[in-house]
Structure formats: structure tokens, C-alpha cells
Amino acid sequence: MRVTVSSLRLFFYFIGALSGFGSLIALSNSGNIIDLLLNFFRLCFSVGLLYIGFTLRQMLVKSPEIIQIAINIQIIIVSVSFGISLLSRPSIPYVMGAMAGMGLMHLLCFYCLSNVKRLSTELRQLKQN
């Protein structure tokens, strides 16, 4: 399946909404200050991912590096929050759910990352012609 700018935009909306929803749930369950700060940062960053979705076409042409950096930061945030959640709530059902969520988010991020590179190259070539 060939990904277009519109379908990639939907992926960014989905990642931003999924991350924001997870952050809101985690904010209500934050037990310590580190959890609270990390979840607040995740919530703010999910708004940034939604913004990237809104301005995707322009950013693909002008500054795809910013999109790639944002996706990489999202991967790091999800991994760090998974590690912190392992330390704070080491129950088997919670860990399994967190692993599934982390795996889904990593797959979506890597998929978006590869398509950002491809679409950026295509749009730049179209602009030159």
C-alpha cells in the first residue's frame, strides 16, 4: 500500500491522539513527581505531534528533519515511560499491557519515519520540476 501525505497525516493524528489519551490516563494515576512530569511532557509532546499532522505537507518540503526528530523523541519518550512504569508498578498484567502499547507505538512511529523520508524526497522532486 502506497502512503500519501493525507494518509500519513492520519497516522500523525492517531499517534498524537493515542499518546495524548494515554498521557491523560497516566496523569490521573501518577504516583510520584517523576511520573507526573513525564506524563505532562508526553501530553505536551502529543499536542506537538497533532500540530505536525496539521502542517505535514509544508514540513515535508521545508524541514523533514524536524518531523524525523519528533518521531525519534516520541520513540524515546515511550521507551522511558515504559521503563519507569516497570519500576513503579511491576505487576504482570500491567507490564503486559504496557508492552503491547509500547510495541504498537513503536511500530507506528517507525512506519511514519520511513514514509516521511520517502514522501519528503518525492515532494522535493515534484517541487523542483
Image: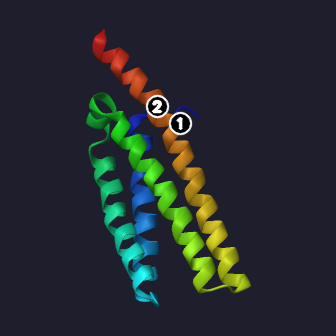
Q: Quadrant of residue 121?
A: top left
Picture mark count: 2
Please state if 59 lies on the left or on the right of 91 as rendered. Answer: left
Q: Quadrant of the C terminus?
A: top left
Point out residue 32 in the picture as x, y percentages from the top left corner. 44, 88
Cα–Cα span, label 2 and label 1: 5 Å
The residue positioned 34% from the left and 41% from the top of the image is 66
The residue positioned 35% from the left and 54% from the top of the image is 49
Disc number placed over residue 117 in the picture, else none: 2
Disc number placed over residue 51 in the picture, else none: none
**Front one among 96 and 53:** 96
Please state if 116 lies on the left or on the right of 107 as rendered. Answer: left
Amino acid type of the residue that numbered disc 2 sits on in the rendered structure: Lys
Point out residue 99 in the picture as x, y percentages from the top left corner. 66, 69
Q: Secondary structure at mark 2?
A: helix
**Badge 2: how crowded within 10 Å, few (<14), some, or many (20+)?**
some
The residue positioned 39% from the left and 55% from the top of the image is 13
